[in-house]
C-alpha cells in the first residue's frame, strides 16, 4: 500500500522490537470509545455493535498479544476522567497525542497521522482559510479536542463555538449557526457521504495530529500494545485496514 495522504490519512512507521514476546494471557480489556466518529468508531444501527477502524486496529493488536477487547461507548467530555478512575483499561477513540495530555496519561506509539480539515455547507465550498481568518466567520468544534484548539487559533475565541458532541457542531453548521466545523480529515469522507449534497470538506490538510491509544500513567500494557502495533504494521494488517476504510491501495 502506498503511504500517500488520502482524506488526511497516513500510516505511521512503527519500529518492531527484536522478537515477539508480549502475551497478556487472554485478558479481557474494556476499551473506552466515543462511538460517534465514523469511520474511526461508530455503532452499527442494524446490530448495535461497535465497529470502525479503531475497533479493527485494537482487535488486530489483541490477536497478536493475546487479549480480548470489549468496547464501551463513553462520551468524549468524560472519557479521560473515566479512564483515570478505572472504568476501563484504555481509550481507543481517534485520540491525538499532545504534550498536555501526556502529563496525565500514557500513549502508545502513533498508529496513524491525521490532518485536520474544515467541513462547510456545499454552497460555501469555495471558501478559503484566509476568508475564515479575515471575515469574522464562525467555526464550530467539539470541546476538549485539538479541533477546538485549532478553531480558536484560526478565528479567535469569540468566533469559536464549542459543543459537547461533534454531532451538535455538525447540526449547528446545517442550521447556519456557524460557517464551518473543524473536523479530523479521517472523518471527512464519512460526513460528506452522510450529508451528500449538503455538506463538504472545504478546507483540507491543516495541522496534523498523530493518533495513539491511551492508558493510565505507568501502565505496563503500553509496551505490549506497542509490540502489537509494530507487528500489525510489519505484516501488512495496518495497511489493509487503512485500505478498507479509506480506499488506499
Image: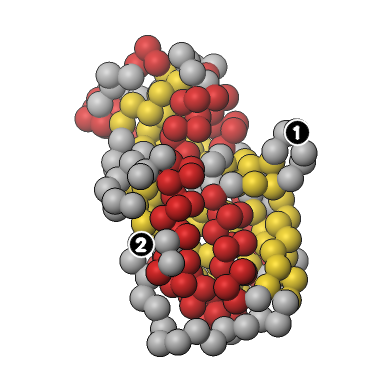
Picture residue at 47% right of the left edge, 39% below the top: 187
Q: Which residue is mark 2?
A: 12
Q: Nearer the viewer, residue 49 or 75?
A: 49
**Quadrant of the snapshot with the C terminus:** top left
Q: Residues within 10 Å of mark 1 (few under 14, many from 20)?
A: few
The vertical placement of 221 against 212, above or below, is below
Give whichever of discs 1 and 2 has the lower sequence position: 2
Where is residue 26 drawn, in percent x and y? 72, 77
Q: Residue at x 43, y 46 (%)?
A: 243
The residue labelled by disc 1 is: 46
Q: Where does the image place residue 86, in percent across and percent down from the top left?
A: 73, 71
Q: Secondary structure at mark 2?
A: loop
Can residue 149 be seen?
A: no
Tag 1 and tag 2, C-beta contact below 8 Å: no
Residue 156 lies, in percent from the top left, at: 35, 39
Which quadrant of the structure image shows residue 8?
Answer: top left
Q: Secondary structure at mark 1?
A: loop
Q: Is residue 66 left or right of residue 174?
A: right
> Quadrant of the rendered structure where residue 68 is?
bottom right
Amino acid at each position: 500500500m502506498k503511504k500517500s495522504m488520502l482524506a488526511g490519512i497516513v500510516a505511521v512507521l512503527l519500529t518492531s522490537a527484536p522478537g515477539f514476546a508480549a502475551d497478556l494471557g487472554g485478558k479481557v480489556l474494556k476499551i473506552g470509545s466515543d462511538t460517534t466518529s465514523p469511520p474511526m468508531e461508530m455503532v452499527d444501527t442494524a446490530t448495535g455493535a461497535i465497529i470502525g477502524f479503531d475497533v479493527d486496529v485494537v482487535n488486530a493488536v489483541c490477536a497478536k498479544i493475546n487479549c480480548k477487547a470489549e468496547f464501551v461507548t463513553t462520551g468524549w467530555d468524560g472519557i479521560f476522567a473515566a479512564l483515570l478512575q478505572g472504568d476501563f483499561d484504555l481509550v481507543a477513540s481517534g485520540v491525538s497525542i499532545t504534550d498536555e495530555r501526556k502529563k496525565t496519561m500514557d500513549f502508545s506509539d502513533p498508529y496513524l497521522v491525521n490532518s485536520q480539515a474544515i467541513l462547510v455547507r456545499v454552497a460555501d465550498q469555495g471558501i478559503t482559510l484566509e476568508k475564515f481568518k479575515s471575515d469574522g466567520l464562525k467555526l464550530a468544534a467539539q470541546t476538549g479536542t485539538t479541533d477546538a484548539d485549532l478553531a480558536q487559533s484560526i478565528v479567535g475565541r469569540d468566533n469559536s463555538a464549542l459543543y459537547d458532541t461533534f454531532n451538535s457542531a455538525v447540526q449547528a453548521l446545517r442550521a447556519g449557526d456557524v460557517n464551518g466545523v473543524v473536523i479530523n480529515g479521517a472523518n471527512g469522507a464519512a460526513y460528506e457521504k452522510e450529508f451528500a449534497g449538503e455538506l463538504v470538506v472545504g478546507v483540507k490538510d491543516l495541522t496534523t495530529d498523530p493518533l495513539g491509544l491511551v492508558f493510565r500513567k505507568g501502565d505496563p500494557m503500553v509496551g505490549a500494545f506497542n509490540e502489537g502495533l509494530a507487528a500489525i504494521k510489519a505484516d501488512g494488517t495496518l495497511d489493509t485496514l487503512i485500505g478498507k476504510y479509506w480506499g488506499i491501495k
